[in-house]
């Protein structure tokens, strides 16, 4: 009861999955993530220096400057999330289409086999009865 899958179609599906995986990794490695990481590293260094110096005016100016940067990043996050969710939705739809086509072909092949088997079984039964009636019983 092994199911045969067309090797070329399987390779096509695997190829599509690999390209989509590369696109997903590309989205994950965007400049915004790199900028956020650089921003966090720079701000932590500056904050450590300011804490050592303990100048209140410097701390206040630093916080105001960094608040603007944080707001920029916060504005970018929803658009990036929207892009990512749109990408995931399109991938989901494409995979569902692929699965439907594969399942549809499997079910059509299975129904064709069943219909062929039922035809052969109905054809064989009258032939058997005719063959049995033509041969005389042996004593």
Image: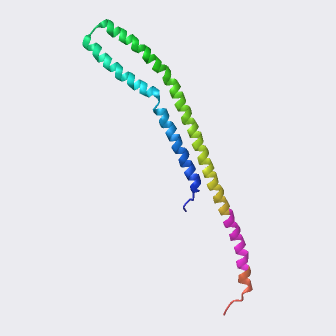
Left or right of 122 on screen, residue 63:
left
Q: Quadrant of residue 121?
A: bottom right
Q: Which residues are magenta?
A: 115-129
Image location (x, y in percent) of residue 42: 35, 20
Q: Is residue 41 above or below residue 8?
A: above
Image location (x, y in percent) of residue 104: 64, 52
Q: Is residue 136 above or below residue 58?
A: below
Left or right of 92 on screen, residue 125:
right
Residue drawn at the location 59% of the way across and 40% of the way down: 93
- How many labels, in total? 0
Residue drawn at the location 57% of the way across and 59% of the way down: 4
Q: Is residue 39 above or below residue 12?
A: above
Q: Quadrant of the N terminus?
A: bottom right
Q: Residue furthest left?
A: 52
**Helix, strand or loop: magenta stretch:** helix
Q: Quadrant of residue 105?
A: bottom right
Residue drawn at the location 64% of the way across and 58% of the way down: 109
């Amino acid at each position: 009861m092994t199911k045969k899958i067309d090797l070329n179609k399987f390779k096509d599906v695997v190829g599509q999955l690999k390209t989509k995986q590369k696109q997903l990794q590309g989205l994950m490695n965007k400049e915004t993530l790199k900028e956020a990481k650089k921003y966090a590293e720079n701000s932590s260094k500056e904050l450590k220096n300011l804490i050592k110096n303990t100048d209140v005016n410097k701390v206040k100016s630093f916080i105001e400057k960094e608040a603007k940067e944080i707001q920029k990043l916060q504005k970018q996050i929803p658009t990036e999330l929207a892009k990512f969710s749109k990408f995931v939705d399109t991938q989901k739809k494409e995979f569902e289409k692929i699965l439907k086509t594969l399942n549809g072909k499997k079910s059509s092949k299975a129904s064709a086999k069943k219909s062929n088997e039922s035809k052969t079984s109905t054809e064989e039964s009258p032939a058997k009865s005719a063959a049995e009636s033509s041969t005389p019983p042996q004593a």
